[in-house]
Image: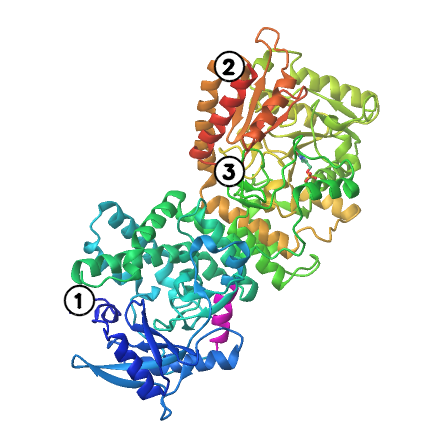
């Protein structure tokens, strides 16, 4: 076995095979207990259950000849240490020989075996199906508590080379030929490649200590109440990465489940409730679980080839291990990783869980009419990428939420927020590098003229501040917006939002003009030309002594019905505003951060350079952070007049969140991804449009998609009720979209940018079914 990887030898040495009467004799002669012995199953040792005449129970362990006195010494001390540090953890106690030694030796078939006697632990071994949520959580806690108990343990022989130690994963390549199925071998190779890339370079930097190293369900006993009553088999323990114990536990609860990750998430939650994971550990969970399954599969395959006579429980279940690995591969190790990492880093919620009906009723009591989406509101408890989950574990495809640009519960964004919150969260009158780096990174993406940034906390505040800048610089008080625009909730931003104007109560200083729609759109040929409307609006503001401070527009005209602009027309409108002494404000709260796929900012596609840009919503992927970008001359005018300071604007936590979002957009190449998936989605929608007459027009840039539903394409009468019905029907199919536009007849599809082709297919098939039902 010259080329054998380290730690293989203990796995192939012939196990002891004493008969039970010999075992009973040893117990009596060496340990002074008289009873009967019954053999138990084991991988490498031989174990006997011993029952004495007066009802005491023990376990006699005849060790594999591969385990020498050093290994046994290590195990004995570990058990003693756990008793000292965590007396309530149910581990076996060593029973000493009549002359006071922790083990003795016996001869059989010319081989010397070391033999120990332990107290017997109550409870039985469990099957996966026995474990409910609470038991899974407790299993996780127990694993963590054993790690905690062993934290301070030291032993000069603590490094026991055993191939089950995930540290040795790369060496499994030399055994891969034993895997006879091509598909399994390919899969194992891919897992090993990922391990080489992601785990191996950092393995030796992970927290390390002596761990159990085989804390699978096989080695945990539960009593009748489902509580852990025993942790057994310390035969694989070694000094290695602490997280490996958790990984073994995770792998062992995932088999034969509808959603294998769900059970593992619960174990993770239990674990981190005792021992929080470090970010690097959390980041590697899925790869380590996969490595564990490959280790198992490859070792067994090698043994089946070279030592067919050796069969034990590791051989019996191995097909389940491979099946699980294939399943995880189908889900995608990255997706599995996201979920495990989210459970690891984000599971501490300081409020009690409530039944959905309760949440709704109690919410109405305190939040009154605060709006909810859908007749049957959705109770959400978790998110992952493009998916959202309710308390029953049902998942919803998110085709609606633009805020979570880089995906729900993005682990890096979550880790950044958590990490910074644990370190420092102050107002911004102190020096901190996060806000400086963030400013530089954002300004780098802007046209050169735009060289200053202010930080606030919401899109509304950003629009409000843009207005203060514009009025301060121009000395004017009038605004131009589009007829169904939405810009926010503050006094000013609500006044700039015709979508929410109360009937007959339009502010006198705000005029409206039609959006400069693309010439390809049906809407380009209706009504008056926006440029002329702009001229009229500016005249009116002049006549009424307001003048124009700003033309404020959402770069994708989302609330007006998702109308990607015609750049020439928009340019002419902007020119007129500037000629009249006003500023041009691009509100990128909807369209920004890569939504359009072609560029970071919506106005770039329209080829204009605004004087002021407002940013918000996606900026923190759900964490509140917003900003206003402008020229230094404009910024200085306000600063000289009144100054401006926002307590939370640009605080270290928000700034760090926003930096993580920028990293994810760049790191995952989300712009080109958005362009690609957007085009794919549009092609699918075009097919639906060919079949369903109700689809009047599809308008899109990147992953901002509007599907206008009309009664006929002569009159273009809006099919508003049908639009609302489709949104509800999609909800029943667990796909979230919205509606928008002056007449509410435009389906608004605006998913997280991590939306991919499969998600698009899923959305399209739900939409097709919903449209079919309308007919
Ligand atoms: N501007 C636009 C274009 C928006 O869509 C919104 C929010 N829908 C806002 C401003 C206001 O942002 P917030 O809700 O964060 O205040």
Q: Measured from the top left, where is residue 430 in percent x and y?
A: 68, 61
- Which mark is in front, 1 or 3? 1
Q: In terms of sequence position, does the residue under pointer 1 or pointer 3 come before the other?
A: 1
Secondary element at tag 3: loop
Kindly identify which residue carries mark 1: 3
Q: Quadrant of the N terminus?
A: bottom left
Q: Quadrant of the C terminus?
A: top right
What residue is at 48 percent from the left and 22 percent from the top? 685
Q: Quadrant of residue 167?
A: bottom left
Q: Which mark is residue 753?
A: 3
Magenta portion: prevailing SS class: helix
State yes or no: Cβ of the residue under disc 3 lies below 8 Å from any atom of ligand 1: no
- Measured in 3D between alpha carbons, the distance from the residue under mark 1 to the one under mark 3, in whole angstroms, is 48 Å
| Residue density around tag 3, few if under 14, some if 14–19, many if 20 or more, within 10 Å | many
- Measured in 3D between alpha carbons, the distance from the residue under mark 2 to the one under mark 3, in whole angstroms, is 27 Å
Q: Measured from the top left, where is residue 290 in percent x and y?
A: 36, 54
Secondary element at tag 2: loop
The answer to whether residue 329 is above or below residue 159 is above
Q: Is residue 277 visible?
A: no
What residue is at 43 percent from the left and 76 percent from the top? 92
- Which mark is in front, 2 or 3? 2
- Measured in 3D between alpha carbons, the distance from the residue under mark 1 to the one under mark 2, in whole angstroms, is 66 Å
- Span shown in magenta: 141-152
Kindly identify which residue carries mark 2: 692
Secondary element at tag 1: loop
Which quadrant contains ligand 1? top right
Contact (Cβ within 8 Å) of mark 1 with mark 2? no
The answer to whether residue 313 is above or below residue 31 is above
Q: Quadrant of residue 611?
A: top right
| Residue density around tag 2, few if under 14, some if 14–19, many if 20 or more, within 10 Å | some
Q: Residue 566: within the magenta?
A: no
């Amino acid at each position: 076995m010259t080329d054998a990887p380290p730690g293989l030898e203990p796995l192939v040495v012939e196990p002891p095979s004493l008969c039970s009467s010999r075992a009973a004799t040893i117990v009596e002669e060496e340990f002074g207990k008289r009873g009967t012995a019954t053999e138990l199953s084991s991988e490498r040792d031989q174990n006997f259950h011993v029952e004495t005449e007066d009802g005491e129970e023990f376990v006699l362990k005849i060790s594999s000849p591969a385990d020498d006195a050093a290994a046994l010494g290590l195990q004995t001390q570990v058990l003693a240490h756990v008793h000292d540090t965590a007396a309530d953890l149910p581990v076996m106690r060593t029973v000493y020989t009549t002359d006071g030694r922790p083990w003795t030796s016996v001869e059989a078939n010319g081989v010397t075996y070391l033999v120990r006697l332990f107290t017997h632990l109550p409870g039985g071994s469990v099957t996966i199906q026995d474990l409910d949520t609470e038991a899974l959580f407790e299993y996780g806690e127990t694993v963590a508590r054993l790690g905690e108990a062993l934290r301070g343990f030291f032993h000069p022989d603590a490094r026991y080379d055993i191939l089950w130690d995930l540290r040795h994963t790369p060496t499994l390549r030399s055994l891969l030929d034993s895997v006879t199925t091509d598909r399994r071998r390919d899969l194992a190779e891919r897992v090993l490649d990922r391990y080489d890339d992601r785990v191996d370079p950092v393995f030796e930097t992970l927290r390390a200590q002596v761990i159990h190293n085989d804390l699978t369900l096989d080695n945990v006993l539960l009593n009748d109440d489902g509580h852990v009553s025993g942790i057994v088999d310390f035969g694989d323990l070694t000094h290695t990465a602490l997280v490996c114990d958790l990984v073994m536990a995770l792998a062992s609860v995932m088999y034969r489940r509808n959603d294998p990750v769900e059970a593992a998430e619960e174990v993770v939650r239990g674990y981190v409730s005792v021992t929080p994971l470090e970010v690097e550990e959390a980041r590697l969970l899925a790869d380590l679980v996969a490595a564990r399954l490959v280790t198992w599969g490859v070792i067994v395959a090698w043994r089946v080839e070279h030592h067919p006579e050796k069969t034990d429980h590791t051989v019996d279940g191995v097909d389940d291990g491979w099946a699980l690995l294939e399943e995880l591969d189908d889900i995608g190790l990255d997706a599995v990783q996201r979920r495990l990492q989210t459970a690891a880093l984000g599971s501490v919620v300081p409020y009690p869980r409530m039944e959905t009906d309760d949440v709704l009723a109690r919410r109405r009591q305190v939040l009154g009419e605060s709006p909810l989406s859908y007749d049957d509101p959705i109770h959400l408890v978790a998110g992952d990428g493009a998916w959202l989950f309710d308390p029953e574990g049902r998942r919803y495809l998110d085709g609606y939420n633009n805020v979570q640009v880089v995906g729900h519960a993005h682990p890096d964004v979550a880790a950044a927020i958590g990490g910074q919150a644990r370190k420092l969260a102050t107002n911004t009158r102190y020096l901190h590098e996060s806000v400086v780096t963030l400013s530089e990174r954002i300004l780098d993406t802007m046209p050169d003229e735009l060289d200053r940034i202010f930080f606030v906390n919401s899109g509304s505040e950003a629009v409000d501040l843009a207005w203060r800048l514009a009025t301060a610089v121009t000395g004017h008080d009038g605004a131009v917006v589009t007829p169904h625009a939405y810009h926010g909730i503050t006094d000013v931003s609500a006044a700039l939002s015709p979508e929410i104007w109360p009937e007959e109560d339009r502010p006198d200083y705000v005029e409206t003009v039609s959006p400069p729609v693309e010439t390809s759109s049906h809407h380009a040929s209706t009504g008056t030309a926006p440029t002329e409307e702009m001229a009229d609006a500016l005249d009116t503001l002049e006549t009424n002594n307001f003048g124009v401070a700003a033309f404020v527009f959402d770069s994708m005209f989302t609330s007006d019905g998702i109308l990607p602009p015609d750049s020439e027309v928009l340019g002419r409108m902007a020119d007129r505003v500037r000629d009249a002494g006003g500023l041009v404000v691009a509100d990128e709260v909807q369209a920004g951060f890569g939504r359009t796929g072609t560029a970071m900012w919506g106005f770039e596609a329209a080829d204009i350079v605004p004087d002021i840009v407002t940013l918000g919503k996606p900026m923190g992927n759900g964490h509140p952070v917003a900003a206003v970008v402008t020229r230094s001359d404009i910024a200085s005018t306000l600063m000289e007049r009144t100054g401006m300071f926002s307590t939370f604007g640009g605080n270290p936590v928000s700034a760090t969140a926003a930096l993580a979002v920028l990293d994810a957009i760049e790191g995952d190449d989300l712009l080109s991804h958005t362009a690609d998936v957007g085009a794919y989605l549009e092609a699918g929608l075009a097919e639906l449009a060919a079949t369903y007459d109700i689809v009047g027009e599809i308008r899109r840039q990147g992953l901002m998609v509007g599907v206008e539903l009309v009664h006929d394409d002569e009159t273009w009468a809006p099919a508003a009720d049908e639009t609302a019905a489709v949104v509800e029907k999609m909800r029943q199919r667990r796909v979230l979209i919205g509606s928008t536009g002056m007449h509410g007849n435009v389906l608004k599809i605006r998913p997280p940018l991590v939306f991919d082709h499969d998600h698009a297919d899923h959305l399209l098939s739900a939409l097709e079914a919903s449209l079919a039902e309308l007919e």
